[in-house]
Image (cartoon, rainbow, N blue to C red):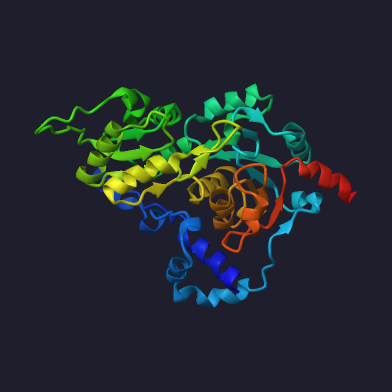
Amino acid sequence: MLRIESVLTTRAVVTALPQTHKSNNSTLWFQSVPRSYKLCRNPLLLNNSKRKASYSSSNSSRMTSFTTRAAVQPLKNADELIDSVETFIFDCDGVIWKGDKLIEGVPETLDMLRSKGKRLVFVTNNSTKSRKQYGKKFETLGLDVSEEEIFASSFAAAAYLKSIDFPKDKKVYVIGEDGILKELELAGFQYLGGPEDGDKKIELKPGFLMEHDHDVGAVVVGFDRYFNYYKIQYGTLCIRENPGCLFIATNRDAVTHLTDAQEWAGGGSMVGALGGSTQREPLVVGKPSTFMMDYLANKFGIAKSQICMVGDRLDTDILFGQNGGCKTLLVLSGVTSLETLQSPNNSIQPDFYTNKISDFLSLKAAAV
C-alpha cells in the first residue's frame, strides 16, 4: 500500500497542461501560463513526509482503483508489448546512444519495429541541438530518422512560446546553447544571450549597476557548457524586474551523458542556479512535463493509450509516460540500475523493464 500511495503521489506532482487561453491583447499574454503547470519538481528528491503532504484527500477515492497494480515486471514477451501499441517513443541518451557511441543492437531493433508498422518518435531533454542538428547525429550514427520524428526540448521551448501567443515584440533571453537559438529563430522569436554571453564577465566596482533589456519577456534555461555568473545575473534581473517575465526550463535533469565514460552535471544544475537567485519555480517544457506528450499526440493523432514510452530515467522518461497515460518500459542501459529500480526508496515503477532495447529481438525469438 505504501508503494501504491507513492506512485499516485508522484503522478500528482506534475499535472497535465490544460488548454491554453489565448488572447489578442499582447499585454495579457503572460496570464495564459497555467499555474498547475509551473511546478515540476523531481519526485525522487521528495521525502516521504512531503509526498504524503502533497497527496490531497480529494484523491483518496482513486486509491481503490490502483491497489491491485502489480509490482514492476521484467519484459518477458516482447511481441505482446509490441502488438499492444501503435507508437514507440524513445529517449535518446542512454537508450539509443551514450555520448557519440551507438548502443549495441539499436539499428536492428528499430528496423524490426518499422517492419511491423510501428510509428517511432525520438524525444530528448538535451537542448544543445535543434531537431535538424539531431537529424544529422542520427545520420552520422547510421540511423535513418527524419526530422519530423525528432522532438528535443529546444524545440519544445519554442513550441510552448508559440502555444501561448508569446508576443513577437518581446525577446527571449537564452541561457543555453545553439539548439535553443536555432529553434527560436525558426519560430520567429527575437532572442539574445546564448553561447556569445559565455565570455562575458562582470567587473564589480563600487556603485556598479548591471543593465538589462526590459523587453525580455521570457528566460529560457537549458544545458549550457558556457554557463557563468554574467548569465545568472542577467537572467535573474529579467525574471525579477521585468513584469510577467517567464522562467522556462527545458529540463531539470540532474545528470547527462556527454561521454560514455561517466555521468556529467545536467541542465538541472543551471536551472537550479536561477531558481535559487530568483526564488521562482520554472515552467518545465521537457520531460516529465506533459507538454511534449500532448504536442505529439495532437500532431500525429495518436491515442496516448496506444503509446509505449521507452527510457532510462525514472524521474523523467518513465514519469513522462505515466503522466501521459502511456505504457512504460525502462531500459537499464543508461542512468538507472536494477538496484535503484528495486529500491524501497524508489516510488516510480514502470510497467516493464529490460536491459536494452535490442532485447526486443532476443525476447521475441525466445517467445517463439
- What's the residue at 60%, 77% (across, down)? 64
Residue 283 picture location, percent across and down: 38, 49
Asked if residue 258 shows in the view, the reply is yes
Picture quadrant of residue 249: top left
Q: Is residue 364 left or right of residue 171?
A: right
- What's the residue at 72%, 46% (across, down)? 355
Q: Closer to the camera, 114 or 56?
A: 56
Q: How many marks?
A: 0
Q: Is residue 78 left or right of residue 279?
A: right
Residue 291 picture location, percent across and down: 48, 48
Residue 92 picture location, percent across and down: 60, 37
Q: In this picture, is 125 found above or below 84? A: above
Q: In this picture, is 49 found above or below 215? A: below
Picture quadrant of residue 100: top right
Asked if residue 250 shows in the view, the reply is no
Residue 248 picture location, percent across and down: 37, 44
Q: Is residue 217 left or right of residue 86?
A: left
Q: Residue furthest right?
A: 368
Q: In this picture, is 72 found above or below 239? A: below
Location of the N terminus by quadrant is bottom right
